[in-house]
Image (spheres, rainbow, N blue to C red):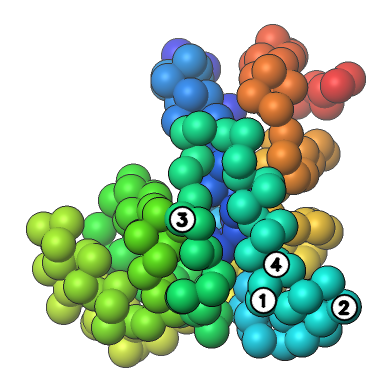
Amino acid sequence: MNKPLVIDYYSDVLCVWAWIAQRRIDQLNKDLNNQIELRYHYVDVFGDVQTKMSTQWQAKGAYEGFAEHVMHAAEQYDDAPVHKNIWKESRPASSASSHLVLKAAELAYGADKSAELALVFRKAFFVELYDIGDVEGLYGLIEHRGLDTPPIKACMNNGSALAALMNDYQSARQLGIKGSPSYVLDGGRQILYGNVGYRVLLANVEELLKQPENEASWC
């Protein structure tokens, strides 16, 4: 049996385009089943939200302008609902705290469980306006899912979760990841970035699945 095709998926939990892309990820897993292996990583886009708003978005209305941008981005996607008061009533200070907890969960409970929690965190923010920058609040979400938090806290406390997160951030820089979400294919030879349509994503992955071993894709 052939080894599954590895897709390294980089995203930021606070990125609306990654929230939109979640359904494409789910469909890709469903359509290609055991032919692919998604490896989840995090990239620093909203590590310092206040500075991002006061620099990149200051001339566009800061938080208010960014809120309008997020609503406009999501309005055509019924499967990526966004609360009407997004970035108005809840303004997480950083996505890094969520990323750190998710890496701790990955170490404690495995990659699949961590990926499930990432979706829980995203939904909590985009739909319920939950402040996912608050670590204690994240522990509450985890416990609500029926998981014990002491193993996760242990990975937070001993530095292993931080090391894993730094590895993600450093790998993203080394690969030249431009933002969230990004799909790294064929060992880094091919990177799809941004709001990539499902058919485009599927076509690129299927093309790689057809390639003889060690042959670079022509896509």
Q: Earlier in the sequence, mark 3 or mark 1?
A: 1
Identify the image quadrant of residue 152.
bottom left
Marks 2 and 4 in Cβ contact (< 8 Å): no
- Label 1 crowd (10 A; few <14 / some 14-19 / many >=20): many
Mark 3, other Cα within 10 Å: few <14 / some 14–19 / many ≥20: some
Q: What residue lies at 72% left-to-right and 34% top-to-bottom?
A: 196
Compare residues 14 and 68 and report the one nearer the observer: 68
Dot 4 corresponds to which residue? 66
Q: Which of marks 4 and 3 is nearer the N terminus?
A: 4
Name the residue tied to disc 1. Answer: 63
The kind of residue on which mark 1 rests is Tyr
| Image position, residue 122 (x, y; %) | 43, 56
Q: Are marks 3 and 1 in contact (CB under 8 Å)?
A: no
Provide the secondary structure element on which disc 1 rests: helix
The Cα atoms of the two marked residues, 3 and 1, are separated by: 15 Å
Residue 120 lies in what quarter of the image?
bottom left
Q: Earlier along the polypeptide chain: callout 2 or callout 4?
A: 2
Cα distance in 3D space between marks 1 and 4:
5 Å
Residue flagged by tag 4: what amino acid is it?
Phe
Query: Please, is residue 41 above or below residue 9 in the view?
Result: below
Distance, label 1 to label 2, CA atoms, is 11 Å
CA–CA distance in space, label 3 to label 2: 24 Å
